[in-house]
Amino acid sequence: MKPAPFRYAAPRTLDEALAVLSQHGAEAKVLAGGQSLVPLLNLRLARPELVVDINRVAGLDAVRHEDGWVEIGALVRQWDAERDPLVRSQVPLLAQALGYVAHPQIRARGTLCGSVAHADPAAEIPLVLTTLGGEVVAARAGGSRTLPAEAFFLDLFTTALASDELVTAIRLPAGGFQGTAFCEFSPREGDFALVAVAVALRWDAGGRIQEARVGVSGVGPTARRVVEAEAALAGEEKSRSAAQRAGEAVAAAVHASGDVHASAEYRRHLARVLTERAVVQAMAIGGEGVDAQ
Amino acid sequence: MNGEAERTVAFTVNGSPWRGTVEVRQSLADVLREAVGLTGTHLGCEHGVCGACTVLVDGRPVRSCLMLAVQADGAQILTVEGLAPGPDQLHPLQEAFWNHHALQCGFCTPGMLMTAWALLQEHPQPTRAEIQTWLSGNICRCTGYQNIVEAVEEAAVRMAGEGGRA
């Protein structure tokens, strides 16, 4: 038996779950998909006194489209979101990214909200949330608050979530971009990425880029948007040279640090190449393609 | 609610009901092996990397080392012991693994078979790339994977010929 002993609560309603967290949050861990928490339990890197399993809580498993947002509940599995018609049509960048999240066996259990709450700096879902300007809905007994992604992710594995709060949903803006792409590099398929880049583009009838979102992970403690690259794309015609300038802007803006997996220089190189590649892919999606130059 | 250290759970394994009391910290893999007595599910890394412990939970491939047994309450579970249609028979996937020498030591094989089973449910005629992607979550240290991929390809053809029997 791998995990250290803990006690187990399986509330049936959100109110019950929040009541448990308000009383025991500091010594508790929330269990949803378990694909990040259970390895930590098995390795005894986490030794919570109480595990609060929210899998039986009613009403957290929906994907909803309202007021211009796609809201994804705490129990929506990555496997389901990947196949969800609403996600695929309204937030294609998320659908593209989900294919890179570990392996089918992990996505069958893992949740999007769990990945967000865990805040691994190399994880795909926090990168998409940050790039698109998404939000995190955090509930506690007696109320809830909504935080923009950039205010939620504070540092490596560190978020603004308090110990008595539960992430009940993430919200992503619906639609708005004709072309999106997600590119990452990892040494083996399904591993955490060394560097990942998410791009979303909106262009006018003449093919001129009106708005660009460029996000990158693997070059800092959290995923981040790179406004310099977004500015480099805004107002430009879709072209490979514009994509190259975006890549250079990312390489100049990020402060990568080296570790056992990759040197700082290599991460910066990946950020540039993957940005260029993702921008080219995003330009091509939507039918008009990219001119050779 | 201060939580419990033990719980009684009931689930169905390979069509048979099982009921028992488990420690809440026991993984589904440990309960399948030690309490249910089905040792075909193998444990390699026990933290979700190697895929050897893959079983089907409600039709989906799951790492049974990353699921607590208490979470399987009410679930339908399929393990490698439940693949073959009967004693002295093999599932087409198992037969294809045999034909293609898709195993050497056999430690990863149960996880490979269960993952391949899930793949063929969703993609009855998978491309080679799809097979490789789906099996990328299962580590084999003997074969070099080529024969495993070929075995899954053959099983897909055979199962399509048999009307998609899984």
Image (cartoon, coloured by chain):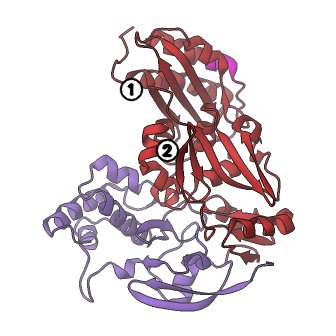
Chain colours: A red, B purple
Magenta residues, dominant SS class: helix
A280 vs A131, nearest the viewer: A131
Residue that appears at 42% across and 77% down: B79
Q: Nearer the viewer, mark 2 or mark 1?
A: 1
Question: Which quadrant, please, contains the C terminus of chain B?
Answer: bottom left
The mark that comes first in sequence, 2 or 1, is 2
Residue under mark 1: which chain is it in?
A
Q: As shown in the figure, which amino acid type bears the numbered disc 1?
A: Ile
Pick out the residue farthest to the left: B161
- Image position of B121 (left or right of A178): left
Q: How far apart are marks 2 and 1 (CA)?
A: 19 Å
- Residue B16 falls in image quadrant: bottom left
Q: Are marks 2 and 1 in contact (CB under 8 Å)?
A: no
Residue matched to label 1: A285
- Image position of A6 (left or right of B99): right
Expressed as whole percent of the image width and height from the top left, the position of residue B67 reads 58, 70
Magenta span has B76? no
Expressed as whole percent of the image width and height from the top left, the position of residue B4 reads 74, 82
Residue that appears at 59% across and 62% down: A59
Q: As shown in the figure, which amino acid type bears the numbered disc 2?
A: Tyr
Residue under mark 2: which chain is it in?
A
Q: Which stretch did the figure color magenta?
A: A249-254
Q: For residue B6, which numbered disc appears in the image?
A: none
- Image position of A269 (left or right of A53): left
Question: Which quadrant, please, contains the N terminus of chain B?
Answer: bottom right
A15 vs A21, nearest the viewer: A15
Q: Dot 1: what SS? A: loop
Asked if A92 appears above or below B45 in the picture, the reply is: above
Q: For residue A100, which numbered disc appears in the image?
A: 2
